[in-house]
Amino acid sequence: IAGGGVRDALARGVCHYVILGGGLASSAHRLARELEGCAVFEVDFPATQEWKRARLQELGISERDSLHFVAIDFEKESLFDRLQAAGFDLERPAFFSWMGVVWYLSEPSFYATLKAVAGAAPGSEIVFEYPVSAAHVQAEDRPLAAMIRMLGAARGEPVGPGFDPAPLVAAVRELGFDTVTDLSYSQIQARHFDGRSDGLRMPRIGHLMIASRH
């Protein structure tokens, strides 16, 4: 999903790609041809990033000169301070991908990160998925939501209570974004999963949000 977003951003001339919570994301390597000449910043918790880089070495995957690893604790450090130290140009628009992270952040850190991105150069955009509150989780997927919470708690990363979509859209707009689009699980299903031969579907436990600056 985010891969399609970065391709659209590249087509608009955006050439800073920031992966927030890089984890095992492989887009910096899968999209190497499309990203040629662009700066890519993978931002993640230091220990996770060290493990990933060691794994890349084991697999013989070289780190491109344009790929910058940025270690951060989202709960304690300033996103743009860390990005600037790695060579990020505040005057250039950027595409931010923030997948699989919001679930485990405190609300203050979540909003602080969004507020920072809202202050990025015009033309910047962020795509992120987030957990919906219990009232919005479909009955069929409640066991999955419960399992995610249990696993998060077991590894010391508790999942927050989730968000009600309409108030969240309003809050994100108030941070300074010009356009905010909230996609429900049914809309994501229709865009990206319908017609698949393997029956894979979008779990009805979260939404996808796209927020941009003009």
Image (cartoon, helix red, strand yellow):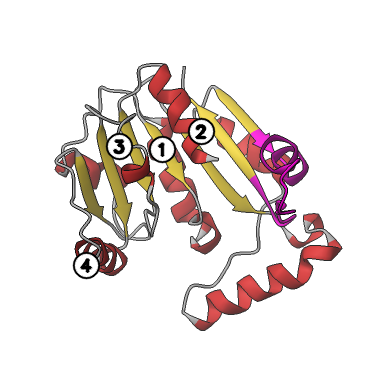
Are the residues flagged by discs 3 and 4 in contact, CB closer than 8 Å?
no
Give the residue type that dot 3 points to: Ala
Residue at horizontal 24%, vertical 42%?
83
Neighbour tally class for label 2: few under 14, some 14-19, many 20 plus, Cα within 10 Å: few
- The residue carrying mark 3 is 32
The quarter of the picture where the N terminus appears is top right
Tag on residue 4? 2
Of discs 2 and 1, which sits in the foreground? 2
Give the residue type that dot 4 points to: Glu
- Compared with 184, 154 (above or below) is below
Magenta stretch containing residue 192, yes or no? Answer: yes
Residue at horizontal 66%, vertical 39%?
192
- The residue carrying mark 4 is 58
Residue at horizontal 75%, vertical 40%?
195
Of discs 4 and 1, which sits in the foreground? 4
- The residue carrying mark 1 is 96
Give the residue type that dot 2 points to: Gly
Of discs 2 and 3, which sits in the foreground? 3
SS category of the residue bearing label 4: helix
